[in-house]
Image (spheres, rainbow, N blue to C red):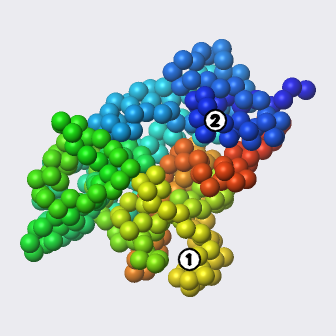
Amino acid sequence: MSQPTIILFGEKNSKRTTYFCKAAQEHNLTVTLLSHENWKKAELQGGFIKIDPPSYNTYDILSIKQSFSNYKTQLLQIEQAANERGIPFLNTPSAIIHALDKNSCKYALMKQHLPVTRLLCSHLNSMEQLIDLMRKMHIYSVFLKPVHGSGAGGIIALSMNPNTEKLSAYTAMHSVEGGLFQSKRIRKLTDYRDAAILVNTLCSLDVMVEQWHPKAQIDRNYFDFRVLWQFGSIDHIVVRASSMPMTNLHLNNCAIPFDKLFESGLLGKKETFLNSLNDLCFKAINNLDGLNIAGFDIMLDKKTLLPRIIEVNGQGDLLYSDIYDKNEIYGKQAEYIRQKTTEL
């Protein structure tokens, strides 16, 4: 009997591909690596399809919209061809597209009354509109996000003093000759004109506005979680901490041990907290059809310590703390595929 096979849409020599193939080999699984762009229907011969994200120029923020449009077209073509051949997916292309659209994903969770960061506006046109929105809603701290961005690309955390209307904006973006480019350093802007240039330029994309909910703190740092969910339960949790509003680790922030939150007495009993987090992810995933695997970004409110879902990533399974340790996440995916292929 030949080895079970998986078709991996990914990039040669990427960390995702390298460590998934390593896990596949350990579980007697054969991997066929295909390009997102240059594949043929005849190559779709396998037990399962896994789709990793392609690498785009993440430094050029204004290219996000077109990159997403191209990727969406590729995903739908893959889905159609695979469905014609009856090949299942780990995560369906439609589900990946749904999760990549922050507005659509958030509405799905809100419809089920799940706790999420509050959506204030699904499409922003200008800095003037933003200031008017904040005044009318009496909400003076917000996040601006490209609807189809990821990894903190294009995000601005902005607060305004309701009395003086003095602004403070935090972002890793820089404006250069009419373009927007991402760096790995979060900076603070206090000049209205500088912030307005960024906001107005960003508004050429599809931009949403969310309320900036204060996050819980430990050792004077704000923290949140990347929660990796797969096959019915939480698999891994990374605690991301920062003195800045954005906690993404590639922005020179740090990870702290999960157990430290309980040793400090901040979150009570570990088992109780994990059960509540698992229940929240379970309810969310049930409203996102087609996802077996998801990376949840979850914060805790500073005052209540209750969780809110910030975002859901349908391709958020690359955790460096895992691949450089036991590589368990990809190992479980390989084992799942091996078992399911045997059942087919």
* Above or below: residue 177 compared with residue 327: above
Query: Measuring 33% from the left and 44% from the top, which residue is drawn there?
Result: 182
Q: Secondary structure at mark 2?
A: helix
Quarter location, residue 11: top right
* Above or below: residue 89 compared with residue 325: above
* Above or below: residue 73 compared with residue 341: above
Q: CA distance from mark 1 to mark 2?
A: 33 Å
**Of callouts 1 and 2, the N-terminal one:** 2
* Above or below: residue 126 compared with residue 213: above
Q: Which residue is mark 1?
A: 261
Q: Which residue is mark 2?
A: 17
Query: Measuring 51% from the left and 40% from the top, which residue is drawn there?
Result: 96
What crowding class fits label 2: few (fewer than 14 Cα within 10 Å), some (14-19), or many (20 or more)?
A: some
What crowding class fits label 1: few (fewer than 14 Cα within 10 Å), some (14-19), or many (20 or more)?
A: some
Q: Nearer the viewer, residue 184 or 155?
A: 184
For the residue marked with disc 1, what is the amino acid? Leu
Query: Measuring 63% from the left and 59% from the top, which residue is drawn there?
Result: 236
- One can see residue 304 in this view: yes
